[in-house]
Amino acid sequence: MEIDLNADLGEGAGFDAELMPLVTSANVCCGAHAGDIETTRATLELAKRHGVSVGAHPGYNDRENFGRRDQSLVVHQVFALCADQVRRLLDLAIPQLVHVKYLKPHGALYNQAGRDPEYAEGVVRAAETHQLLIVGLPGSEMERVAGGRVPFIPEGFADRRYRPDGSLVPRTEPDAFVHDPDEAVRQVEWLIREKGVRTICVHGDNPQAVAFTRAVRAALLARGFVLRPFA
């Protein structure tokens, strides 16, 4: 069985060089919630060197909260936020001959677009404008709004716990994170089987990200999974 393994990179966490060889897709920060131009360039170069697929990872311009605080926006503001950040990433990627293939919102933007049709519409419009696929939670508003407009790739998380309705346990709640790689792989198998996910995320800003990702990757391969980018 094939699965894509993605990570949020280019955020200045300091682990990109170690994580890039372990994943098959990189969600590259567009410089709003974290990162800077030089970090983005370096991340794109790493992705190119290791043959890793690249996606745009736009977020709220809220560095103090790492883009993880909800914002009150309307559709055209969400569209402008995403489209402008994707354009800035493309301006860096094209000269390096790196093809940006998809859009995955970051943090609070991801969560709001997952549950609110206006935020989802803004994200989908940005993906349409730049002819990108969209990555998001299965059964989310992003998936519904994307239907018939842009291809949607359902995503699961190896290092986050889920509520019974399929939403993520908020980071502010106890026991929101999965730390044990074996538990993570069991969750991945459930997500593939029950939710139809095609890509699995590990967060690159986690201090244990490298060891955790290496262990999850090894466990997936040991169970017969083929790691391959979805695009």
Image: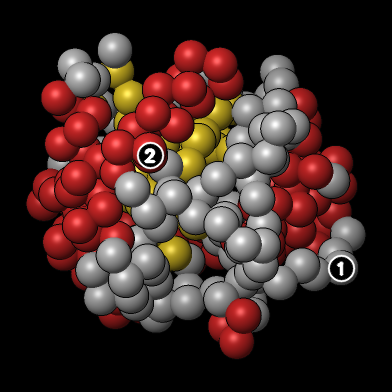
Image disc number at residue 72 = 1
Using the rendered view, name the quadrant where residue 218 is placed: top left
Residue linked to disc 2: 184
* Mark 1 residue type: Ser
Residue at image coords 39%, 29%: 186
Instruction: Examine the rendered structure and indicate whether residue 168 appears above or below residue 9.
Output: above
Which residue sits at x=66%, y=67%? 172
Res. 212 visible in picture: yes
* Residue 194 percent across, percent down from the top left: 56, 16
Which residue reaches farthest bottom? Answer: 64
Vertical placement of residue 120 versus 185, above or below: below
**Dot 2 amino acid type:** Ala
Instruction: Give the left or right position of residue 182, taking residue 69 as reference.
Output: left
Q: Is residue 40 visible?
A: no
- For label 2, count other residues whose C-alpha is less than 10 Å away and answer few (under 14), some (14-19) or many (20+): many
In the visual, does 78 lie left or right of 216?
right
Callout 1 environment at 10 Å: few (<14), some (14 to 19), or many (20+)?
A: few
User: Residue 72, percent across and down?
Assistant: 86, 68
Q: Residue at x 20, y 33 (%)?
A: 219
If the image is split into quadrants, where does the N terminus sit? Answer: top left
In the image shown, does 2 or 182 lie closer to the viewer?
Answer: 182
